[in-house]
Structures are given as structure tokens and as C-alpha cells.
């Protein structure tokens, strides 16, 4: 299993949690971004630098992931693609995307995008807080513990 991170928009505090988990459990962690990243020196952490452009990092992740991998992303279409390929998707707020909730999330995303493009104001997400960080760390730990048990 590999953990893939849509790293351009991933908060630094979430990356730090992932670095520690990769080291502790010796799990490959790959961050994909369109800008260079500073990561800790580790044989378990690597980066892939992609060209700038819409969905370039997302497409790189989608092409490389395997069934059972974990994708860390707030990008709902990437999460849907990952689920469709047999992988798992977790957002930085600690919420797993599932086959049961991803269609609803895609529909809501499309609706909000339509509202924004028609000039209707739609507020963005609130800043990540301590509750979000804890929820993410807890969900990640539970997921990795289940994977370790087989």
C-alpha cells in the first residue's frame, strides 16, 4: 500500500502527521505537487514534481495508484476516481469519501460550482482547526491499523 497526497493544497500540519505515520509504520508516502516541496529526509517519503496546470497532479496520482492505496485529497473528482479504481480517499478534515457518499459530494460540488459561476456568492471552507487535525490523525491511525491487521 502507498499513501498518495494531493500536496499542492494539503495543509502543512496534515503533511506533518503523514510524515510521522510513514516513518513510524514504514509505509511509502508520495506527495505530488506542481511546486517543489520540502520534505523530511526519509526512505519512506518521496515527491513527484509535475507541471503546472489544472488537474495535472490529480491525473498523475490517478495513473499511479493501485487498489488498496490511500489518497489524501480535498479534491472530490480525484477522490471519486480513486474510489472507482479500488483505492481509499481521505480528506484533510478527516472525512473518508466512500462509494456511498461520493456521488452526493460530486453533485453538491457541481451545484456550488454552478452557483459561483452564475455570480452567487458561496463561502469557502473554514480554516482547518484542532478538531479537524485530530479527526484526520484518528481516522488515519484507524485506517492504517486495519490495514496492518490485514
Image (tube, rainbow, N blue to C red):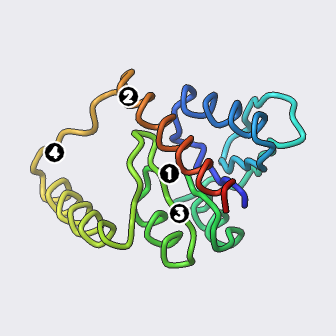
Determine whether 148 is above or below 126 in the image. below
Identify residue for label 3: 88
Residue at x 33%, y 68% (from the top left corner):
102
Q: First in sequence: mark 3 or mark 4? A: 3
Seen as rendered, the residue at the extreme left is 120
Disc 3 from disc 4: Cα separation: 28 Å
Tell whether 35 sits left or right of 80. right
Residue tagged by mark 4? 122
- Distance, label 2 to label 3, CA atoms, is 22 Å
Dot 1 or dot 3, earlier in sequence? 1
In this view, the residue in front, 74 or 20, is 20
Graded by Cα atoms within 10 Å as few (under 14), some (14 to 19) or many (20 or more), the crowding at tag 4 reads few
Residue identifier under label 2: 128
Alpha-carbon neighbours of circle 3 within 10 Å: few (<14), some, or many (≥20)?
many
Position in image of residue 24 (x %, y %)? 76, 34
- The answer to whether marks 3 and 4 mark residues whose Cβ atoms lie closer than 8 Å is no
Amino acid at each position: 500500500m502507498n499513501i498518495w497526497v494531493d500536496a499542492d493544497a494539503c495543509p502543512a500540519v496534515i503533511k506533518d502527521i503523514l510524515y510521522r505515520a510513514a516513518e513510524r509504520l514504514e509505509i511509502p508516502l508520495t506527495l505530488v505537487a506542481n511546486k517543489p516541496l520540502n520534505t523530511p529526509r526519509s526512505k519512506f517519503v518521496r515527491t513527484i514534481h509535475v507541471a503546472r496546470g489544472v488537474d495535472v497532479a490529480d491525473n498523475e496520482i490517478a495513473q499511479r495508484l493501485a487498489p488498496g492505496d490511500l489518497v489524501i485529497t480535498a479534491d472530490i473528482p480525484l477522490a471519486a476516481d480513486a474510489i472507482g479504481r479500488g483505492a481509499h480517499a481521505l480528506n484533510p478534515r478527516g472525512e473518508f469519501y466512500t462509494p456511498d457518499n461520493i456521488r452526493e459530494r460530486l453533485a453538491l460540488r457541481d451545484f456550488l460550482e454552478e452557483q459561483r459561476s452564475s455570480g452567487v456568492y458561496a463561502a469557502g471552507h473554514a480554516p482547518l482547526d484542532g478538531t479537524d487535525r485530530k479527526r484526520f490523525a484518528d481516522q488515519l491511525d484507524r485506517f492504517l491499523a486495519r490495514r496492518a491487521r490485514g
